[in-house]
Amino acid sequence: MPKKVTWRMGQKHGVIATGIGMLLLATGGCAGQAPKPAPTMTQDQVREHADKTFDKLKQEEKNRPVGGPY
């Protein structure tokens, strides 16, 4: 086997090893961060949000023209 081919194979393995190493470091860095807890809403907050949305919908319906395209 010529020397040039052996050197290219070594270089190829080095690039692969470097890529795998970088991937492992990136994965480890992301896994090191604690996940943020999901925000929780109480039933009263959900009800209040729904009431506001419903009131907004009623107001839009009231302001809509009678012979509108809808």
Image (cartoon, helix red, strand yellow):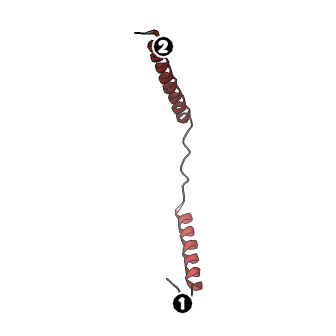
**What residue is shown with label 1?**
66
Residue at the image point whose x is 39% and y is 9% from the top: 1
The relative height of residue 5 versus residue 61 in the rendered view (above or below) is above
The image quarter in which residue 30 lies? top right
Instruction: Point out residue 8 in the picture as x, y percentages from the top left corner.
Output: 47, 17
Q: What amino acid type is highlighted by mark number 2?
A: Trp
Dot 1 lies on which element? loop
Amino acid residing under circle 1: Val
| Name of the residue lying farthest toward the bottom | 67
Quarter of the image where one finds residue 6: top left
Q: CA distance from mark 2 to mark 1?
A: 81 Å
Task: Compare residues 10 and 55 and report the one nearer the observer.
Answer: 10
Q: Residue at x 54, y 90 (%)?
A: 66
Relative vertical location of residue 60 with respect to residue 47 in this rendering, above or below: below
Q: Residue drawn at (52%, 90%), measured in percent from left and top? A: 67
Residue at 54% across, 32% down = 26
Q: Position of residue 9 (x, y in %)?
A: 45, 17
Label 2 crowd bin: few (<14), some (14–19), many (20+), radius 10 Å = few
Upstream in sequence: badge 2 or badge 1: 2
Where is 40 relative to 4, above or below? below
6 or 60: nearer the viewer: 6
Please give the label number shown on residue 7. Answer: 2
- Residue 49 coordinates in the image, percent (x, y): 56, 68
All told, the count of numbered labels is 2
